[in-house]
Amino acid sequence: MTASAPDRGSADTERVLERLRVQGHRMTPQRRAIVAEVIATRGHISPQAIAARVQDRVPGVNASTVYRTLDLLEELGVVSHAHTERGAEYHRSEHRDHLHLVCAGCGRQESRPAEDVEEARRGFARGTGFMPDFTHFAISGLCEACRGEDRDG
Amino acid sequence: MTASAPDRGSADTERVLERLRVQGHRMTPQRRAIVAEVIATRGHISPQAIAARVQDRVPGVNASTVYRTLDLLEELGVVSHAHTERGAEYHRSEHRDHLHLVCAGCGRQESRPAEDVEEARRGFARGTGFMPDFTHFAISGLCEACRGEDRDG
DNA sequence: TTAAATGCAAAGAGTTTGCACTTAG
DNA sequence: CTAAGTGCAAACTCTTTGCATTTAA
């Protein structure tokens, strides 16, 4: 179990499964695999990607099961979704606190801890009266490299 | 032509049509109606909404024509799109400078001039190295009213 | 045993594409 | 006249739903 390899049998996964069990939900192999996949994912992942990866491990898992399971996990507060250029992407709720940055220049996506923009959040609220949650939608802009080339981001 | 009524025969519309003409594009009634509709729209509008409205004025305009025309207008820099909770929405590029705020509490959408968050933009760049364009994706958060009830926006 | 969960197939919504027909220039 | 533009139908992607079957508890 290296630090870089996603860990589909982690204590975190077990904790979520235990929570499902306690709340009276059944523990099917499909559900187990889907939960493990989501928990093992660093950052965000699309429903289709989850389906594809889960099917590598448990052949025949239907996409509709993935969608139903994600809905369940979201209701339980285990996962949340964010809107990126490609649509909805899911991530662990505990990892909610990161930004999805999409560079309009090079197209690269990066993540940042939300705490890096606490000051900006307050400034935003000061200017608009609206307290933003910068993690729910992706944020377009120019990354450091592209800002160097084109100074008007 | 009052200030509050959308103006589908405006000088702005004519300016865009003239630009298309100059660049060698043909001026069809469909194209004329679609351009007029987009130009007359304050804020953003979805492709389906454009199709519906245009069809009220020029019956039989096909949705695919709307998509193709929007692509063309976007290539020419006349319109841009933003990503909201409901998907892609289009707006005049000159009106690019407004934010799409979606309140997670009451669900209401509001617009704000982007200049209201200039300070926040710089703060964001300072914290992350990434210069954000807050207008391309909608921004989730809590509006002033909902912040009053739930102080953790 | 039995209700929850799954698979499957069908249905949507939104968007794109290929192609024959129409039409602006 | 002739190529750009359109309409139409079909395809495609992503997601949801109804229902019969399977299965965890």
Image (tube, coloured by chain):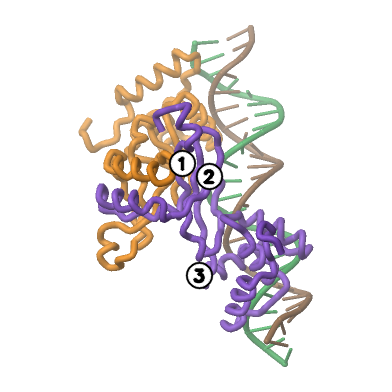
Chain colours: A purple, B orange, C green, D brown
Q: Position of residue A4 (x, y in %)?
A: 67, 57
Q: Earlier in the sequence, mark 2 or mark 1?
A: 2
Quarter containing the C terminus of chain B: bottom left
Residue under label 2: A85
Judged from this view, the residue extending furthest toward the left is B2
Q: Residues within 10 Å of mark 2 (few under 14, many from 20)?
A: some
Amino acid bearing label 1: Ser
Q: Earlier in the sequence, mark 2 or mark 3?
A: 3
Tell me: B71 left or right of A69.
left
Q: Position of residue B48 (x, y in %)?
A: 47, 43
Residue under label 1: A140
Amino acid bearing label 2: Glu
Quarter-wise, where is residue B15 in the image? Answer: top left
Residue under label 3: A77
Classify mark 3: helix, strand or loop.
loop
Quarter containing the N terminus of chain B: top left
Marks 3 and 1: CB-CB under 8 Å?
A: no
Quarter-wise, where is residue B39 in the image? Answer: top left
Q: Residue at x 39, y 29 (%)?
A: A152
Front-most of B36 and A67? A67
Using the rendered image of the protein, determine whether residue A9 is visible from the camera's viewpoint.
Answer: yes
Marks 2 and 1: CB-CB under 8 Å?
A: yes
Classify mark 2: helix, strand or loop.
loop
Mark 3–mark 1 distance (CA, rounded to whole Å): 27 Å
Q: Residue at x 55, y 34 (%)?
A: A106
Chain assignment, label 1: A
Mark 2–mark 3 distance (CA, rounded to whole Å): 24 Å
Chain assignment, label 2: A
Front-most of A23 and A4? A4
